[in-house]
Amino acid sequence: MAMDILAYTFGVIALVAAIKCFVDENWGEKMHRESEDITAPDAKDMTQDKKAA
């Protein structure tokens, strides 16, 4: 009985850890994409400034 509870608890912890890793990976990728979107206009502005100069 105790081993069943221990195994069930371990399975739940492993499942939660896997979901957390999946969410962190997707969140990091989303934040990286957003940071590229934010920096892209700056890069375009710099190239336009160089052309104007």
Image (cartoon, rainbow, N blue to C red):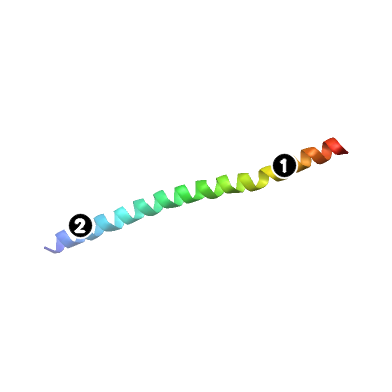
Residue topped by disc 1 = 43
Separation of disc 1 and disc 2 at Cα? 54 Å
Q: Quadrant of residue 3?
A: bottom left
Quadrant position of residue 2: bottom left
Location of the C terminus (image quadrant) = top right
Residue 31 vs residue 44, the one in the foreground: 44
Q: Label 2, on which residue? A: 7
Could you tell whether 53 is left or right of 33 in the image?
Answer: right
35 w.r.t. 2: above or below: above
The location of residue 24, given as percent across then percent down, is 45, 52
Q: What residue is shown at x 83% (from left), y 38% (from top)?
A: 50
Q: Residue furthest left?
A: 1
Say if mark 1 contacts mark 2, CB within 8 Å: no
Q: Is residue 25 left or right of residue 19?
A: right
Q: Which amino acid, by three-letter code, is at mark 2? A: Ala
Three-letter residue code for mark 1 = Ala
Which mark sits nearer the N-terminus, 1 or 2? Answer: 2
Quarter of the figure with residue 41:
top right
x and y percentages locating residue 11 in the rendered image: 25, 55
Q: Mark 1 against mark 2, which lies toward the viewer?
A: 1
Residue 44 is situated, as x and y percent measured from the top left of the image, at 73, 40
